[in-house]
Image (cartoon, coloured by chain):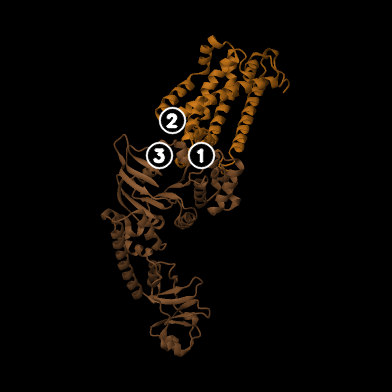
Chain colours: A orange, B brown
Amino acid sequence: MNGFFDIPSDLQHSWPGLIGLHVREALLPVAAGLLLALPLAQLCVRLRWLYAPVLGVTTVLYAIPSLAFFVVLIDYTGQTELTVMIPLAVYSLVVLVPAIVDAVRSVPQETLAAATAMGFGPVRRYLQVQLPIAAPAVIAGLRVATASSISLVSVGALIGNQGALGNLLAAAQKYDRPELAVNSVLTTAALAILCDALLVLLRRVLTPWMPRGSGGGPRAAAAASQRPEAEVAAR
Amino acid sequence: MIRIDSVTKRYPDGTVAVDRLSLEIPDRSITVLVGPSGCGKTTTLRMINRMVEPTEGTILLDGQDIQRRPVTALRRSMGYVIQNAGLFQHRTIVDNIATVPRMLGWGKQKSRARAAELMERVGLDSALAKRYPYQLSGGQQQRVGVARALAADPPVLLMDEPFSAVDPVVRKGLQDELLRLQDELGKTIVFVTHDIDEAIKLGTTVAVLREGGRLAQYAPPAELLSAPADGFVEDFLGADRGIRRLSFFSSAALELTVDPVITADADAGRIAASGTPHLLVTDADGRPLGWAERREAAAGPVDTERLLPHGRPFVPGTDSLRAALDCAVLSPTGWAVAVDGTGRVTGVVSQATIAEAIRTAHTQSRAEAARQAGETGEPRDADAADRADKAEVAP
């Protein structure tokens, strides 16, 4: 394992530096995706007819290979992190929008009727009742989006060293140092597991009101199985 | 007073949920809206707090059109209890109850103190305050629902099938609790149910609605049972309305006899003096032990091990004629046992005597109805309903 952490200088980063870069390139798009998905999902809940077309469009966008995205974006944003992050943000929508829509819709009718009858306006009802109750399913969606995003960042290596830990894969080929590829895969996997654990912890902290031992609830399981990992891995 | 004035709710697809409904809901009483599904009872309830807006007609609250009040303020002045409670699963019990006070801008301390007070009032252990709804049973959740509706002390309470989803034993407990609470608080309660027994038990006045949202009859429960307006109401009341009506007649006037009542150590002379084939044997304190055959009892000391069961006794004055009749029907001898509040026998009464009392009660009730009709010139108004209630005995 000689030189396992010995990163070629043309990557311009140390190993911890690459991890930091990877985290930023993976998580900022998920955060942006969440900010975009929340209002979009709320629109879909309010205007039922909108949900099918929104779901269709996000799915089509998800089907566009990231390389094709890069080719288009490179004219506008150049060989930058942004070029990697924009497609990732778009991809996260396909997981987050249905997760939030289903979660908000699954809030029991009695609860909504009770809130309305107690004099909650629509905004207060959304922020204080629907969103908190939807939180576990939203976090379940975030877990899928985060794992997928962390694995997809590596593709950025194709547009000139914007793949963070993925750049190690390119370097492994270039310098014939397979241990760098092993490093890349293991570190990426560890990062994904750590982020997932943090999200599970966040859910625990945010939802003391959930029955223990039910995991993310039936909704979360449904959201997770809806987007098979194989689809993500295929990228 | 809530006055519903020829209100119609027609949906865009042409369905009529409520059809020219007019009701006057008196203050400080329980008005029950009852009917089969699709009769518009929930729609009517939801028009009172404007969760549904009527297509035609007006609803007046204390003389003012509810359309003229801001909708959130209107709703916060009316408690609302729903089936399955509809609690906020992400908030603790105390925070659930404090919801409306917090929205009205009460301080955190004051709201919580009020919530604690209400938990006690609806019979919830204060240890549950910090729990979450999933940790409570259905009956407990429903109590929290009632407490939450009462939190800001609204004059009006709207209840939409609140007890339909709990088992019969818990439901009976909740119904009794509601009647007790209403005695203390005197709210104007509008209560929706599909259960006619619940309507008769809880209602000061009962509005029976039929499919298509039309009013079939609006009357106090005793009148509903004695004089259903038409075949629909009669069918809806069920086959045993005659028996159920007895719930509204007091057993106070029943003529009890103590002749067949003996103590376990009674002498032969006392036994011979009674003229009935069975004797009720009591212990030295006067509590019932069971029935003995007179022939056997006369033969020697009463064997308390071999008595026939005396069944559940009734308390004259507290229980209704229905309870007394039930005791007599279930008794192996056909005689009902009457006891006082402490369980001591005050006498026994035969089925024949009870039947006589029922006939008398019917006659009196007819005379009373005729007298009232003559007095007011109207078949029924809110005052008449009130007077009739005072004469009634809880079922």
Category of crowding for the residue at label 3, using alpha-carbon neighbours closer than 10 angstroms: few (below 14), some (14–19), many (at least 20)? some
Disc 3, SS: helix
Q: Circle 2 is placed at which residue position?
A: A46
| Res B348 quadrant in image | bottom left
Category of crowding for the residue at label 2, using alpha-carbon neighbours closer than 10 angstroms: few (below 14), some (14–19), many (at least 20)? few
Q: Circle 1 is placed at which residue position?
A: A218
Q: Quadrant of the C terminus of chain B?
A: bottom left
Marks 3 and 1 sit apart, C-alpha to C-alpha, by: 42 Å
A115 vs B64, nearest the viewer: B64
Marks 1 and 2 sit apart, C-alpha to C-alpha, by: 23 Å
Query: Do residues under tags 1 and 2 come within 8 Å of each other at their CB atoms?
Result: no
Q: Earlier in the sequence, mark 1 or mark 2?
A: 2
Chain hosting mark 1: A
Marks 3 and 2 sit apart, C-alpha to C-alpha, by: 27 Å
Query: What's the mark number on residue B66?
Result: 3
Q: Amino acid at mark 2?
A: Arg
The extreme right residue here reads A2
Residue B149 point in image, percent of width and height: 49, 46
